[in-house]
Image (cartoon, rainbow, N blue to C red):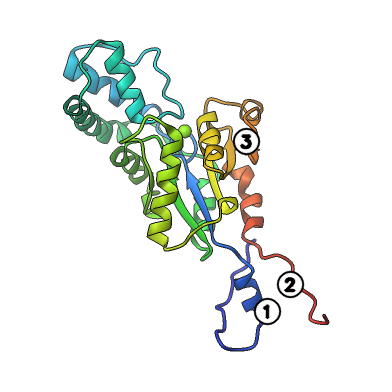
Amino acid sequence: MVRIHGRACIGSKLTSNTWREVNLKPRLFLFDIDLTLVDTARAGSRSMAIAFYELFGITDAFNGIPFAGRTDLAIVKDAIALHGISDGDRVIAQLKEAYFIHLGRLLYEASGRVLPGVMDLLELLSSHKHAYLGLATGNFRRSGMMKLERYELAGYFKEGGFGDETIVRAEVVAEAIRRCQEAASVVFALEDIYVIGDTAHDIESGKANGARTIGVATGPSSTEQLAQHQPTLVFQDLQAALPFFGSLLEPAAEPSSRS
Ligand SMILES: [Mg+2]
């Protein structure tokens, strides 16, 4: 169990609780969404395919296009290029609008779920004053938040990086760090930023930003496959990762008072 920490006593003698407060560093935890926090039972990819068919009359437009760990903008651009449709902001905006409409329906029809350990971990982190939560997801901002709202997780997250503006996942992480630092008015040391996700893209994008990375094998990759990308740590799922996160929130040992 993680200890509950007392308030620092400003201007008074250094108490035991004060020691714990000053010895804990602020840490930022950036989460991927799909197959890290939730499994939407492919509501996202199915909604995108329906939207594409509606606009362009092409069925199975995303066959052969990888989704896992990539930004939604990259996925949409791939499909547009594959089917010879002229690229442009207006086309992408139309696709996004149609996608959001179908996602809003399919998210509630599909038999998705919150993944093991997620609720306990988010409760643990959000109850701790030195832990900050954010998103680093390839989802468009709106659809990412729709997925979290569907599973009642949206309240844990205020900011993050999303897949609206870039096809480069590492830029999503950079955006997430920047936005979360602004929102929290905290500058996090890189060693205190954790990027958590289920694909090699999550791990590589975290490493590209100098952050620590946590791989979870709740997506398409096994722990062995994720380990090949040398994350800081890899777990079967976030349930198995709970003790690690709990230990991060513990202060270092209190120094001897006899020194
Ligand atoms: Mg994912």
Q: Position of residue 206 (x, y in %)?
A: 53, 40
The residue indicated by pointer 2 is 254
Q: Nearer the viewer, mark 2 or mark 3?
A: 2
* Residue 37 in the figure: left or right of residue 99: right
Mark 1 or mark 2: whose residue is earlier in sequence: 1
The residue indicated by pointer 1 is 16
The span from disc 1 to disc 3 (Cα, nearest Å) is 36 Å
Of 3 and 194, the residue lying toward us: 194
Q: Which mark is residue 150?
A: none
Q: Position of residue 27 (x, y in %)?
A: 54, 57
* Residue 186 in the figure: left or right of residue 154: right
Q: Amino acid at mark 2?
A: Glu
Mark 2 or mark 3: whose residue is earlier in sequence: 3
Q: Position of residue 198 (x, y in %)?
A: 53, 33
Mark 1 or mark 3: whose residue is earlier in sequence: 1
* Residue 135 in the figure: left or right of residue 79: right
The residue indicated by pointer 3 is 236
- At a point 22% along the width and 16% down the height, the residue shown is 53
Q: Amino acid at mark 3?
A: Gln
